[in-house]
Amino acid sequence: MASYVHIPALELQGFVTRIFLAAGCTEAEAGRISHHLVGANLAGHDSHGVVRVPRYVEWHRAGHIVGGRKAEVVTDGGGFLLLDGGYGWGQVVAEQATRLAIARARQLGACVMGLRNSAHLGRVGDYAEMAAAEGLISIHFVNVGGSVLVAPFGGAERRFSTAPFSVGVPLPGGPVVLDFATSLVAEGKVLVASNGGKALPEGALVSPDGTLSADPRTLYGDYAPVGPRNPENGLGAIRAFGEHKGSGLAFMCELLAGCLTGSPTSGPVEARGRVVNGMLSIHLSPKHFGDEAAFHAAAQSYVDWVKTCRPVHPDEPVLAPGEMESRRRAERLVSGVPLPEEAWANIRATAAALGVEAP
């Protein structure tokens, strides 16, 4: 069993902010990145949380992430926007692009926004929650250029990125937010498992000979207990979720978030190292569709009815998408953010190398 430490959320966020300041980020960048990463941990998406701090610092040091960038408008068609992130911090440029799309959708009723050439933009559900907080429905397709990690259905070689997908719907009882990677597990979950965290499900990975595996070394190759994890050192792949269905959705994420926006696809890859996100987002205003109150009433009634379904296990009620994240957020704000000791050691080592004292 993995051993965990629990860090108060605000203390952890301050620590992570200091790390990124020491790495050369502006105060605005460091604050936004740390807020997003700790927010992912609070929601229970540990794969997209602070476990990524050492990797982000490494990417920034190598020049794969460029500080000080803003999302630049390439094409502005009113209800259609294409922006370029210039390889800037993903949490920063994706927020800027999303805020602009939200403003347009509130004004016009709908906005289709494409973002290309963003560094890793983190938990996609964060952008769906941002839109929902403004009363907007949103749909997000994301791909990861230069990150070939996932085998297509029936394959034993990497062809897809983890290609996340998210949908957010604002309702009076709280937003319904669907957010998942189209791989059976996110690469960050393999990273968490390799750092002594929650073990992977059996068969989450596939070796080049077609053997199914749950060993992170299938993806990363051999690694030390404390130190970087690089999927380029491994030969295996993550499997797509849902057999042909997840594989097909991943395919579409690459075509829409990558090819359509002009962002790189997962492959063919000539020069690996820089991870580039593309995102195609659709924002819709229920007000412009007609009777917003009627929509809210009908949708909330449907959500409530679905949740009355008799559960298979009496102590595990049926939940709507996003409810588990809300529950974990409430719990972890009280108990602290749980981190595997190996992951915490990696973060502390990164901080020490930058002269930042750990709490």
Image (cartoon, helix red, strand yellow):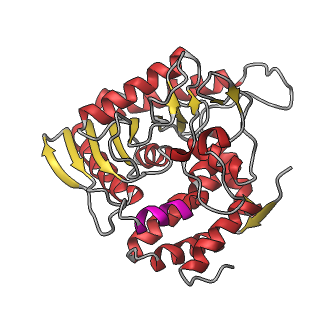
Estimate the x, y position of residue 293 in percent, counting from the top left.
43, 32
Tell me which segment is drawn in magenta.
54-61
| Residue 338 seen from this side | no
User: Which residue corresponds to the image point at 69% horizontal and 49% vertical from the top-left?
Assistant: 194
User: Which residue corresponds to the image point at 24% horizontal and 45% vertical from the top-left?
Assistant: 104
- Quadrant of the image occupied by residue 6: bottom right
Image quarter of the C terminus: bottom right
Main secondary structure of the magenta stretch? helix
Side of 299 relative to 105 (left or right): right
Residue 326 against residue 79 in the figure, above or below: below
- Quadrant of the image occupied by residue 218: top right
Side of 214 relative to 72 (left or right): right
Q: Is residue 58 magenta?
A: yes
Side of 97 relative to 73 (left or right): right
| Residue 306 seen from this side | yes
Estimate the x, y position of residue 91 in percent, counting from the top left.
41, 57
